[in-house]
Amino acid sequence: MSLFRKLPGVVLAEFESTGSLLHAAEKMSEAGYEKYDCHSPFPIHGMDQAMRLKRSPMGYIIGTMGTIGMIGMIALTYWTNIYGYQMVISGKEYFSWQAFIPVIFAITILLSAFGAFFGMLALNKLPQLFNPIFGSDLFAKVTDDGFFVSVECDDPMYDEAKVKSFLESIGGKNVEVVKGE
Amino acid sequence: MSSNAKDLTNLKVQKELLIDGNPTFGSVTNDVSRVVESKPGKLWYLLFGISVSLTLMLFGMIGYLFWEGTGIWGLNNPVGWGWAIVNFVFWVGIGHAGTLISAVLFLLRQRWRTSINRFAEAMTIFAVICALLFPTIHVGRVWLLYWVLPLPNQMAMWPNFRSPLLWDTFAVGTYFTCSLLFWYVGLIPDLATLRDRAKDKISKLMYGIFALGWRGGNRQWQHYELAYLVLAGISTPLVLSVHSIVSTDFATSLVPGWHTTIFPPYFVAGAIFSGFAMVMTLALIARKVYNLEHIFTSKVLERMSWVMLLTGSMVGYAYAMEFFIAWYSGNEYERFAFINRAFGPYAWAYWIMITCNVISPQLFWFKKLRTSIPVLFILSIVINIGMWFERFVIVMTLSRDFLPSSWDYFSPTIYDVGILIGSFGLFFTMFLLFLRFLPLVAMSEVKGVLPEADPHHGGSH
């Protein structure tokens, strides 16, 4: 059971190869489906265009986090050296920024990495340990050598019979309905 | 399938195949997962037993060190940085090859990296854990270690951000965290594979939790790939900066022989050199023990030897240049430091270093030698011995500083030796646990470089 919303059931169809999955993705987006996904054991080149996905906003998340890290660390080194604990070292100015670049750089990188990692998890809604799609025995192949298209039942164009026949018409095999909660 | 097989043979002619044999997606999954799913052999238990014993010895000695203080080491007045710093630089250096393989070669689209990338990254993490141990115990009063962090405290003191030792804290700490995240992101799809194959409850639960519910949908892959790309992108300048910063521990001091601008690039080259040697050692063992010859192909090994030849030559050039500049500078202390290295009390260590690091990688010019597995294995170990001695030679510069009356010779005690050996035990304990429970080859990435992974393969599109 999901904590936040009911997870929709899906119609699942298996495809033979990366080529046929890519082809299917093009047909799906041409037909106007929105809530569908193409599952594969590894990312497939050109799939984003075939599914007409928008560019991932990851770059903005990472950029923001990195900037926060950089500004934060500049502020910390400035504050500690001007107000926190003044030290004269080699007769240099209190805020001798050149010497602070290594730590500023490190924290910029650190927060960017957090942005990349947690941003990816958030956008993918992970961790999500349960999903109705795992109810399909066939779907276990997706992490091995299976290629699948899934259509969620809350897609505006959803009609079980139509979706099934459409998936078959574009080359899907073993079409299966996986019930939601 | 038969048409695929035919295409594969055609492709062999057109472009080189990264994975030997006639692999399918399924065979890659099986070959890699079988390592984790089958019970480990006697050899694994034997190695694990030895490693754990050494680790326990390490912890025991560290416990004694905490009780007694750093006096149990062979430190003396000029040589205040004994083996702890040698080992620290050695282990950080080992780690660098993992990041180079996983991040730099990824950005350069060197797809041969896929087979070695996972365990090279694992090696990075374990090596950095071993590395972090040494400055931690070297501070003496470990309970005051939090002083290196900018935490508000009752003394109203703040760390000195101008100190290279503090830069180390930030650089190596960040390096460890980023490497761990990068490694874990790469592991998610493969953990999902193990989750879907798991038979018993415990593995289902554990792999299930760590796979985070990965479904392999392209809407997930889209963000995933970008996160992976960016992590690679930020790890690249990071890895170059980390060893540069480690070198500034030496270079920003006024000790002759340390105070040189050549240190950062020379340390980075040396780090990659030693790290590749370590990856080579581990890969050769793993491919033998787990019969993965078709995944860690001889082509991959040969390319690794190219990298070692390149970085080894850079290291050799740096040694020569250091000597030349010491003479050219006209500074008598600088000159003395280098002549003393080569002909002084530590000459034995210097010539071990030269033999292992300058001469031995040149053997990789010969195709016969760089394609021979025993030669690769021996040379990879020789190089690591040499790289340990490089750091030893550098740190021992301290033994003869400006004032002859304060000169002293450093002799390690049993605790120096024991903690170094124990750190290898810790490293191999973690590495063996990794081999036992996690996929040692990035399955999803290897599948991605198979010819069938190309959607336009075989003209089906």
Image (cartoon, grey):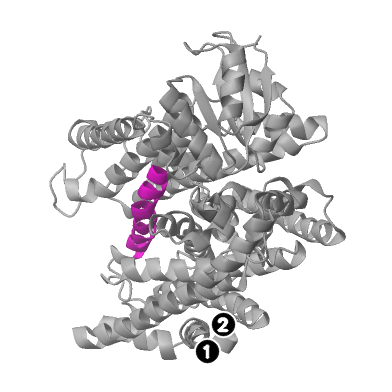
The residue under label 1 is B366
In the rendered image of this protein, does residue B269 appear above or below residue A35?
Answer: below
Can you tell which mark lies on residue B370?
A: 2
Q: Is residue B40 left or right of residue B407?
A: right
- Asked which secondary structure carries label 2, the reply is helix
The residue shown at (40%, 45%) is B229
Image x and y of residue B414, in percent: 66, 67
Which residues make up the magenta segment? B229-250
Residues B392 and B379: in front is B379
Q: Tell me the subunit letter for badge 1.
A: B
Do callouts 2 and 1 point to residues on the same chain?
A: yes
Whether residue B426 can be seen here: yes
- Classified by dominant secondary structure, the portion drawn in magenta counts as helix
Q: Is residue B207 left or right of residue B88?
A: right
Of residue B431 and residue A174, the one placed in the foreground of this image is: A174
Name the quadrant containing residue B8. Answer: bottom right
Q: Residue at x 68, y 66 (%)?
A: B21
Q: CA distance from mark 2 to mark 1?
A: 6 Å
Question: Image point 34% across, 61% down: which residue?
Answer: B244
Looking at the rendered structure, the kind of residue marked 2 is: Arg
